Image (cartoon, rainbow, N blue to C red):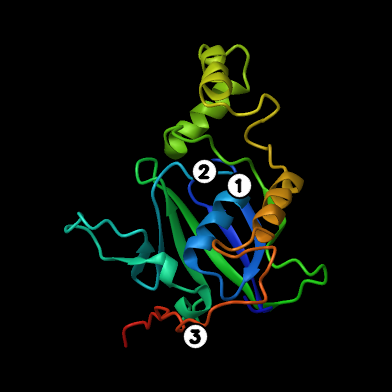
Amino acid sequence: MNSNLYLLKITLKGCHVKIWRKFAVPADIKLDKLHQVIQTVMGWTDSHLHEFKIGGAHFGVPDPDDDWGEEVIAEKKCRLDRMLAPGFKQFQYVYDFGDDWEHVIKVESLDYRNESGRTIFCFDGQGACPPEDVGSTPGYADFCDAVNNPSHPEHKSMKEWVYDCCGYPKDKTWPDGFDIDAVNQKLAAYENKPKSGTSLKNTSAKKKTAPKKHYVWMPPK
């Protein structure tokens, strides 16, 4: 990847509390990798389908058996810097088509400078990520009311569901439990993870291969 970084801010829409993250990624990151970064910075568990919406086009994991919905372009072929046409400073990310969590991603800088040398890093954020399968934004509001109020009739059952059934750590709290240090530890492990098929013992001798073809999306005129 090149050294040019994009500074992004992702915001979860429609919640009763503010939930957002500000983070940096390489400009040439593939959308499938950006999806993994988003899952980490937000706190999702990558348990459901997702898609990006950029300039009217849909990017994700195409379903060969789906002939009815919008065409989905394979995200693993798409670089972020080649998807953002001149002037594009905002796009969407949707996670879990059941709960339908809609995120808005704003590009705050196309040439961010990070003196730490890190290429994937979370700088700031607010609000805990909702639990998976909580029932979208109305369900999350009801969940927060119940889990934080010992006198609520569903307080005990909600705590049993989220901690015992779903497996969230006992010290996890809602709606304010955002641990930026834990997020960056996970991002560091991901950032330093070797690419699939690359040996750490000997990377000097590589076979020459034909250059990969990358999808470049152009907005309609």
Q: Position of residue 88 (x, y in %)?
A: 49, 78
First-in-chain label (3 vs 1): 1
- Circle 2 sits in a helix, a strand or a loop, which is it? loop
Q: Position of residue 142 (x, y in %)?
A: 49, 27
* Disc number placed over residue 86 in the picture, else none: 3
The one of 64 and 17 positioned closer to us in this rendering: 64
Tell which residue pokes out farthest to the right in this image. Answer: 115
Q: Amino acid at mark 3?
A: Pro
Label 1 sits on residue: 18
Total numbered badges shown on the rendered structure: 3
Q: Are marks 2 and 1 in contact (CB under 8 Å)?
A: yes
Q: Position of residue 82 (x, y in %)?
A: 48, 80
Tell which residue pokes out farthest to the bottom in this image. Answer: 221
- Which quadrant: the N terminus? bottom right
32 relative position to 220: left or right:
right
- Circle 3 sits in a helix, a strand or a loop, which is it? loop
Q: Residue at x 52, y 42 (%)?
A: 45
- Circle 1 sits in a helix, a strand or a loop, which is it? loop
Q: Amino acid at mark 2?
A: Cys
Where residue 7 sits, quadrant-wise, is: bottom right
Label 2 sits on residue: 15
- Which quadrant: the C terminus? bottom left
Q: Position of residue 203 (x, y in %)?
A: 66, 71
122 relative position to 70: left or right:
right
- Is 178 placed above or below 67 here? above
